[in-house]
Image (cartoon, grey):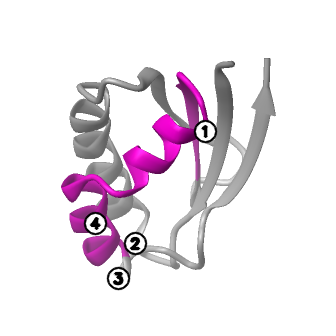
Amino acid sequence: MPLHVFAIITAKPGAGAALKTGLQDLVSKVRTEEACLLYELFDSTEQPEKFIMNELWTDEAGLQAHNQMPHMKEFGELAKNWLAGPPELLKIER
């Protein structure tokens, strides 16, 4: 069953531009993953430090495989300098 995920990502003060660039780079890599059906980045118009990732995965196993990808680990290391905290994930099965 497909798994829909919304990730709410918040930048540290002053790190919004760097985080956005990193997320944009990440999108192109994630879209090549076999289990990825949709991966879109949105900017909040009301809170410029917030970003929303709209994701659709083949299933929970596909999402877990995504989290282990080298590009995700690389992004995680870079994002330590940009993130105000861990992303808030909302999972929805459809």
**What amino acid does circle 3 point to?**
Asn
Rendered-image quadrant of the N terminus? top right
Residue 26: mark: none
Q: Nearer the viewer, mark 2 or mark 1?
A: 1
Taking 66 as reference, is 88 above or below it? below
Mark 1 burial class by Cα count in 10 Å: few <14, some 14-19, many 20+ = some
Is 69 magenta? The answer is yes
Element assignment for label 2: loop
Q: CA distance from mark 3 to mark 2?
A: 8 Å
Which residue has dot 4 on it? 73
* Circle 2: residue type: Ala
Q: Secondary structure at mark 3?
A: loop
Amino acid type of disc 4? Lys
**Nearer to me, 72 or 17:** 72
Q: Where does label 1 land, which residue?
A: 60
Q: Secondary structure at mark 1?
A: helix
